[in-house]
Amino acid sequence: MSRKLYLDNAATTRVGKEVIDEMSKYFDEFYGNPSSQLYELGRRSKEAIERARRTVADFINANEKEIYFTASGTESDNWAIKGVAFANLNKGKNHIITTKIEHQAVIHTCEYLEKFGIETTYLDVDKYGLIDLEQLKEAIKAETMLISIMFANNEIGTIQPIEEIGKIARDNKILFHVDGVQALGSVKIDVEKQNIDLLSMSAHKIGGPKGIGGLYIRRGTRIDNLVHGGAQERGKRAGTEGVQNIVGFGKAVEIVKENFDSNIERITTLRDRLIEGIKNNIPDVVLNGHPTKRLANNVNFSYKYIEGESILLLLDMEGISASSGSACTSGSLDPSHVLLATGMDHGTAHGSIRFTISEETTEEDIDYTVETIKRIVDKLRAMSPIKNDEDLKKS
Amino acid sequence: MYTAEVMDHFRNPRNVGNMENADGVGQVGNPKCGDIMKIYLKIKDEIIEDVKFETFGCGSAIASSSMATELIKGKSIHEAVTMTNKAVIEALGGLPPVKVHCSVLAEQAVKSALYDYAQKSNKVIKGLENYKPEDDEVHCH
């Protein structure tokens, strides 16, 4: 294999040396339990946590007292939704509004809450993956306690009008939770300007370690704990803190903050080069997601008449790592719920491939990817019994 | 995830392509489930002289089709009809449990092509008496 090209940065990212160096001290040098405040070693750990907390808070224009560390973006989503739901149980508030394209961490949590008599409305999206603000307004009831909408979609990269949604939530005195896991580091997040009450974050999507997430909780928000136990995280999230992971999260944010604008601009240019390259060189492709309101690093196309897992296997043989919305790669029977929600037919949805680039991606990488995916698509189409839309309809 | 044999048949599929004036053609599966297989047969004196396949599907679907065509090529139609999905799995050195349906589809594609041949040539193939081409209802496995 001549080349290794990692284009699955929405799945996870490489942890940089600077981050690892910063973290490594907290394994064998400053290994004290942050709850052990009576000796220096414990205080060092506590200080490191608080430094990271300030960095994360600054990054989203929050106060450090509003940031809580969790074990993952998924835990943050669970905490935000269950925590608000349980705090409102038996108070006549039993309705949540979310969308059909949320991450499983949100959708499966809302499904679980049905057991407790909590109803959820799942908003539709248009062919670009955008919600309709009018439908949102109509879905609001007297019983609605929470609106939970992702900032940007992990599969198709579509960015929602978060500020407008936040305003609608605020005007109706409903809490607004945003799953910001994919958006953090790629879009400017400002919890004040965007009227966000709860924001889920994850470190490993932005060059930090796996196993560490964060939840921003606006001061004064009524929310139950999810994890009960000791007094860590100001009594709101029990369990000894993963100090080295928290430190890694903080460092990753620090690095993303430097040159944020110029980095995003550069990645966006590369993204558009990849989009144009694929559109101009391969017939019968559909760009999934919005052409401009999309994450700087996300390129997701459906290649008609072929299936995504086959494409991924052949890409892997050429050294390229990517991901697919095909059912064959998910272990479920249906292709991506996100693509189906945009109105795409099953056959076309099975042929979707997502490339997510990083600041390490070069122009040469992009051109290699275009050339490689074209070769693979040609090969698989030559093998397929489906040659056009009519064949697709007939079968 | 896949055996070396599966990867070999996926990477270098045997008998891939279509066939003009085929004596029997069978297509099974549907785009909703994410796999479609089409098998073409050239039959002379009840012997499968040539076979081709076209497949829309995942790696194991392509490998299963390729292996199935290898298993029936040169065989009599009466032998070919007894080819089971288990034989395909065995020849591939195994398939992950979630991919077993690909081998089932390969068996069905062969049967469907043989059925088409039997219909066109007014022949009876033992083992196909009760065979019905797929109904329209979609069942993903």
Image (spheres, coloured by chain):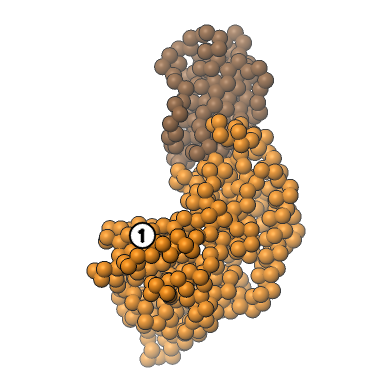
Chain colours: A orange, B brown
Which residue has dot 1 on it?
A120
| Quadrant in which residue A99 is drawn | bottom left
Residue drawn at (32%, 67%) of the image: A142
Which residue is at 28% across, 58% downward?
A: A115
Q: Give residue B30's position: percent from left, percent from top.
A: 51, 34
Where's residue A357, x and y in %?
64, 61
Q: Position of residue A231 (x, y in %)?
A: 33, 81
Question: Would you place residue A204 above or below residue B30 in this image?
Answer: below
Is residue B112 visible to the viewer in this orientation of the structure?
A: yes
Residue A217 in the image, given as x and y percentages of width and height: 41, 77
Q: Residue at x 45, y 16 (%)?
A: B128
Give the answer, above or below, for where A228 lies relative to A337.
Answer: below
Residue type indicated by callout 1: Thr
Q: Which residue is more in the foreground, A329 or A300?
A: A300
Tell me the quarter of the image containing the C terminus of chain A. top right
Query: In front here: A251 or B87?
Result: A251
Residue positioned 24% across, 69% down in the render: A90
Question: Within 10 angstroms of label 1, few (less than 14), some, or many (20 or more) residues?
Answer: many
Q: Nearer the viewer, residue B140 or A96?
A: A96
Q: Which quadrant of the figure has residue A313?
A: top right
Determine if residue B71 is in view.
Answer: no
Q: Chain of mark 1?
A: A
How many numbered marks are there?
Answer: 1
Q: Secondary structure at mark 1?
A: strand
Foreground residue among B34 and A246:
B34
Relative side of A109 to B95, left or right: left
Describe residue B129's horizontal placement relative to residue A249 as left or right: left
